[in-house]
């Protein structure tokens, strides 16, 4: 892993940042507050090849990896336009299909995921399972023509804009009778599929939904990958999710820090700008340091994942997501504090970032579960749950 980005990646940062600034936070915030979507930006990013930089070239992608895709999301977030569905559609779903899908599945889904004309959601969380993915009860049973899938999922992003959802369910092992994880592609318009919006106290264009699957009949080729290796396939998708969640949080942190820095350079109460006072300057400097450290861990996680080292990438991706979530919360809070009363106004657009940043401590995996992971797997401590 090089600590100096290649010329191609520096150019990618530049052109994506320009696209993000073309839209900007005011546009993004207006879409969120009006109940609108970010479709225009999404399709522009797809047309320019940014959404599919991690996907295979033969299916319309850029042939790169998670390091490239994380740059796209980070730069869009830093420009004030963090596209949450990038964490899901090209990242989790695109990765799982490109690594484990059949030739037909790749040909059918990957070109649309790459150019943005197809969005795929991802459904793993259940009301009673919470963080315990081993307790998932969404179950698929074999039928004469394929599968029948039933269950319920919650906090599923983007079902209103998705054409399909990659569902984590369970199938019965014929030998033991026990349930084991399996991944299914479910069209949103399939009979038996319903979803209802969950009202959130978040200012975001990306809505959250409860998903209901009532005896949804699927063809045999709805199953992605091997029925016997789905747990490994699932985690092959969750590592990119954590990397991209880190990019999402880092983008928000950068945007908040940039707003705070610009403000304190100009705001003058006594003889000098308030940014000259250590009570203002030092917290912002600390955030800059923590931001760079989080990015380094994200880049390490992406490099390990792209090199095929899933085990090491899992540890690094969890650490990156933890660090990025923490600095996002600190950056948005300090931005509000640095702007004082102005930090709470709609005009300056800082307070609206706080809830989004706070969510990065919770989703897609909570900081407590990451600490459990590090304690057990990195430190070798006894399992706590």
Image (spheres, helix red, strand yellow):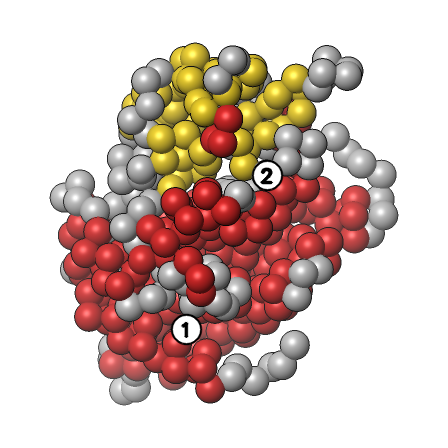
Front-most of residues 23 and 184: 184
Q: Mark 1, residues whose alpha carbon is within 10 Å: few (<14), some, or many (≥20)?
A: some
Q: Say which element carries label 1.
A: helix
Counting residues from the start of the chain, the first of labels 1 and 2 encountered is 2
- Kindly identify which residue carries mark 1: 280
Q: CA distance from mark 1 to mark 2?
A: 53 Å
Q: Is residue 61 visible?
A: yes
Would you name the residue on which mark 2 appears? 225
Does dot 2 land on a helix, a strand or a loop? loop
Front-most of residues 129 and 346? 129
Location of residue 84 in the rendering, given as x and y in whole percent from the top left corner: 37, 50
The picture places residue 208, in percent across and down from the top left corner, at 34, 34
Q: Residue at x 33, y 45 (%)?
A: 119
The x, y position of residue 212, in whole percent, is 39, 19
Q: Which corner quadrant of the image does residue 368 belong to? A: top right
103 lies left or right of 131: left
Tag nearer the camera, 1 or 2:
2
What quarter of the picture does the C terminus occupy?
Answer: top right
Residue at 46%, 42% (x, y): give it: 105
Q: Give me the residue at 31% from left, 37% from top.
A: 163
Q: Nearer the viewer, residue 239 or 94?
A: 94
Q: Is residue 207 above or below residue 344?
A: above
Q: Is residue 130 visible?
A: no
Q: Along the horizontal axis of the image, is 241 left or right of 32?
A: right
Look at the picture and state if 212 lies above or below 344: above
């Amino acid at each position: 892993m090089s600590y100096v980005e290649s010329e191609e990646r520096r150019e990618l940062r530049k052109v994506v940042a320009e696209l993000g600034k073309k839209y900007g936070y005011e546009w993004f915030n207006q879409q969120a507050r009006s109940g609108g979507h970010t479709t225009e930006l999404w399709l522009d990013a797809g047309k320019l090849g940014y959404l599919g930089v991690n996907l295979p070239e033969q299916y319309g992608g850029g042939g790169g990896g998670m390091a490239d895709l994380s740059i796209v999301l980070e730069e869009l977030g830093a420009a004030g336009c963090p596209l949450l569905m990038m964490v899901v559609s090209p990242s989790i779903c695109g990765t799982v299909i490109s690594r484990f899908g059949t030739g037909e599945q790749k040909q059918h889904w990957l070109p649309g995921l790459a150019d943005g004309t197809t969005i795929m959601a991802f459904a793993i969380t259940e009301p009673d399972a919470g963080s315990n993915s081993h307790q998932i009860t969404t179950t698929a049973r074999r039928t004469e023509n394929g599968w029948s899938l039933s269950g319920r999922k919650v906090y599923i992003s983007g079902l209103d804009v998705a054409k399909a959802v990659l569902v984590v369910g369970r199938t019965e092992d014929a030998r033991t009778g026990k349930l084991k994880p399996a991944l299914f592609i479910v069209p949103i318009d399939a009979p038996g599929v319903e979803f209802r919006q969950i009202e959130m106290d978040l200012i975001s264009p990306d809505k959250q939904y409860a998903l209901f699957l009532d005896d949804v009949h699927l063809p045999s080729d709805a199953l992605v990958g091997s029925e016997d290796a789905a747990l490994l396939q699932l985690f092959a998708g969750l590592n990119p999710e954590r990397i991209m969640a880190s990019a999402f949080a880092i983008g928000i942190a950068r945007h908040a820090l940039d707003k705070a820095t610009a403000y304190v350079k100009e705001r003058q109460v006594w003889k000098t700008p308030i940014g000259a006072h250590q009570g203002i300057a030092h917290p912002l400097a600390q955030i800059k340091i923590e931001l760079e450290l989080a990015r380094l861990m994200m880049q390490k996680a992406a490099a390990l994942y792209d090199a095929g080292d899933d085990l090491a990438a899992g540890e690094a991706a969890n650490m990156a997501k933890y660090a990025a979530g923490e600095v996002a919360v600190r950056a948005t809070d300090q931005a509000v504090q640095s702007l004082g009363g102005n930090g709470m106004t709609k005009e300056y657009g800082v307070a609206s970032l706080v809830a989004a940043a706070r969510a990065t401590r919770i989703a897609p995996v909570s900081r407590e579960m990451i600490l459990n992971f590090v304690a057990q797997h990195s430190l070798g401590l006894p399992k706590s749950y």
